[in-house]
Image (spheres, rainbow, N blue to C red):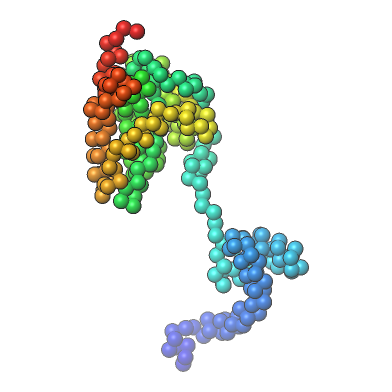
Amino acid sequence: MLCDIANVSRSGYYRWLAHANEPRKDYRDYLLIKEIFEKGKSKLGWRTIQMRLKRDKGVVMNHKKIQRIKNHYGLCTKIRKVNPYKAIMKKTQEHRTFSNVLNREFTQAAPYRVFGTDITYLPFNRHMAYLSTVKDFASGEIVAWEVSRHLTMNIVVNTIDCLKNTVDAATLADSLIHSDQGVHYTNPEYIRMIKELNMVQSMSRKGICLDNAPTESFFGHFKDDSDYQDCKTFEELKELVNKDIQYYNHERPQWNLKKMTPVEYRNHLLTTPQ
């Protein structure tokens, strides 16, 4: 009658009754496992627990029993998060680095011959966006940029597409583009795009940001001058970044550019005999 009321089959009830005392039987083993698990700061899997049971307690326990007890008592192992950059890198063995061809020769006399590229973070309204740029080291002009919600390959692909639309392909041939050794710039897709433009790829030494100082300097000045953190939406942020970079290129004179804006200085260099 009770099985009918509870909508439980008789065989199911008797199966439960036969195993009802099993948790009590495992309770001492649970206390042993719990002690080792908590000493390991909840980061131990069944293999480590099994080894430590034998070494520290002299107890030999089957791995299936350890797993069953962990699951029954909710002993969930904390798993270290995968580094997204390493995960992307492991997807292909074709990622490769290039030598530092630029070698900190930042002062250039001819526009469109040496470029620097990098990505920076733009936190706003409890969200994160990313800015990718290409800077002409001769004039200081930002010749290409892309703002994105995500740090995927699309951000650098779109930046290079922007570069192709800004500077004639024939002009880009044999020019140099310098970056760090980030996973985006060692990616086969980026390498292929640069090769198709007949550009020379150069990279900073690992962990030395000064090898790409002009690009880092722009990011610093941009973040000082821009009110990007006040933006409420991504669309507002993107519009502001476009406006601020246009201002930087066309209206912001710089002392070391003979008090000209980057665009004015670029035109000055193009019309001045070398």
Quadrant assignment, res 35 = bottom right
Which residue is situated farthest in the bottom direction here? 1
Instruction: Depth check: give the residue in front, 265 or 32.
Output: 265
Instruction: Depth check: give the residue in front, 168 or 71.
Output: 168
Q: Is residue 219 left or right of residue 268?
A: right
**Can residue 254 be seen in this snapshot?**
yes
- Quadrant in the picture for the C terminus: top left
Q: Position of residue 49 (x, y in %)?
A: 66, 63
When the figure is inspected, residue 2 is found, relative to residue 154, above or below; the finding is: below
Q: Residue at x 39, y 31 (%)?
A: 217
Q: Residue at x 51, y 46 (%)?
A: 83
Figure label count: 0
Which residue is situated farthest in the top direction here? 273
When the figure is inspected, residue 13 is found, relative to residue 267, above or below; the finding is: below
Q: Position of residue 39 (x, y in %)?
A: 64, 65
Q: Residue at x 35, y 46 (%)?
A: 123
Quadrant assignment, res 53 = bottom right
Instruction: Depth check: give the residue in front, 170 or 216.
Output: 216
**Can residue 199 be seen in this snapshot?**
no
Q: Position of residue 82 (x, y in %)?
A: 51, 49
Q: Is residue 260 left or right of residue 14?
A: left
Which residue is situated farthest in the right direction here? 58
Q: Position of residue 6 (x, y in %)?
A: 44, 86
Instruction: Depth check: give the residue in front, 91 or 263.
Output: 263
Q: Residue at x 52, y 34 (%)?
A: 207
